[in-house]
């Protein structure tokens, strides 16, 4: 696993959510993935949870995400800083993304700055 793999995965997730392409976004995650997002007050489990999260908070709010920076924490984990705009206004977010050996997302801890 390289730092490029984590950046590539972050870019792929941002591209899919910006296109409101839930089906493609779901394929970036393992079936047992977890998205924990305290800003929403919810935890989202598995592919069904990912689909719900994206449809609710990206499609539903017309969210556009812009990559700001990435900090590699380990070979399989990175903290991605992003700019969110949408029907809710504007927020800066942090996505701690963990991936498996196949490069699929296993966990995201999402929060707002």
Image: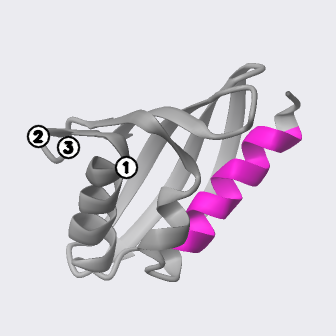
* Numbered badge on residue 39: 3
* Mark 3 surroundings within 10 Å by alpha-carbon count, few (fewer than 14), some (14 through 19), many (20 or more): few
Measured in 3D between alpha carbons, the distance from the residue under mark 1 to the one under mark 3, in whole angstroms, is 20 Å
How far apart marks 2 and 3 lie (CA) works out to: 6 Å
Inter-mark Cα distance, 2 to 1: 19 Å
In percent of the image, x 48 and y 78: which residue is there?
21
Check residue 40 for magenta coloring.
no
> In front here: 78 or 20?
20
Within 10 angstroms of label 1, few (less than 14), some, or many (20 or more) residues? many
* Residue 49 on image: x %, y %: 27, 49
Residues at discs 1 and 3 in contact (Cβ within 8 Å): no
Determine contact: label 2, label 3, CB under 8 Å. yes
Residue at disc 2, secondary structure = loop
**From this viewpoint, is residue 65 visible?**
no
* Point 55% across, 69% down: residue: 24
Mark 2, residue position: 41
Kind of element beneath mark 3: loop
Report the side of 43 relative to 68 (left or right). Answer: left
Percent coordinates x, y for residue 48 in the rendering = 28, 52
The C terminus lies in quadrant? top left
Q: Is residue 15 above or below residue 102?
A: below
Q: Earlier in the sequence, mark 2 or mark 1?
A: 2
The extreme front residue here reads 31
Determine whether, in the image, residue 51 is placed left or right of residue 87. Answer: right
Badge 1 is on which residue?
47
Using the image as rendered, state which of residue 98 and residue 47 is in the foreground. Answer: 47
Q: Is residue 9 left or right of residue 111?
A: right
Q: Principal SS element in the magenta part?
A: helix
Residue 81 vertical position relative to residue 82 in the rendered view, above or below = above
- Look at the image and give the residue range highlighted in magenta: 4-16
- At 32% across and 61% down in the image, what residue appears? 51
| Horizontal and vertical percent position of residue 100 | 66, 27
């Amino acid at each position: 696993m390289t730092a490029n793999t984590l950046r590539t995965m972050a870019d792929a997730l941002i591209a899919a959510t910006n296109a409101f392409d839930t089906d493609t976004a779901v394929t970036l995650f393992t079936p047992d993935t977890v998205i924990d997002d305290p800003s929403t007050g919810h935890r989202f489990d598995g592919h069904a949870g990912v689909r719900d999260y994206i449809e609710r908070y990206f499609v539903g709010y017309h969210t556009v995400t812009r990559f700001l920076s990435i900090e590699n924490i380990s070979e399989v984990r990175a903290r991605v800083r992003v700019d969110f705009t949408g029907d809710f206004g504007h927020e800066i977010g942090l996505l701690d993304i963990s991936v498996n050996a196949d490069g699929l997302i296993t966990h995201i801890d999402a929060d707002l700055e």
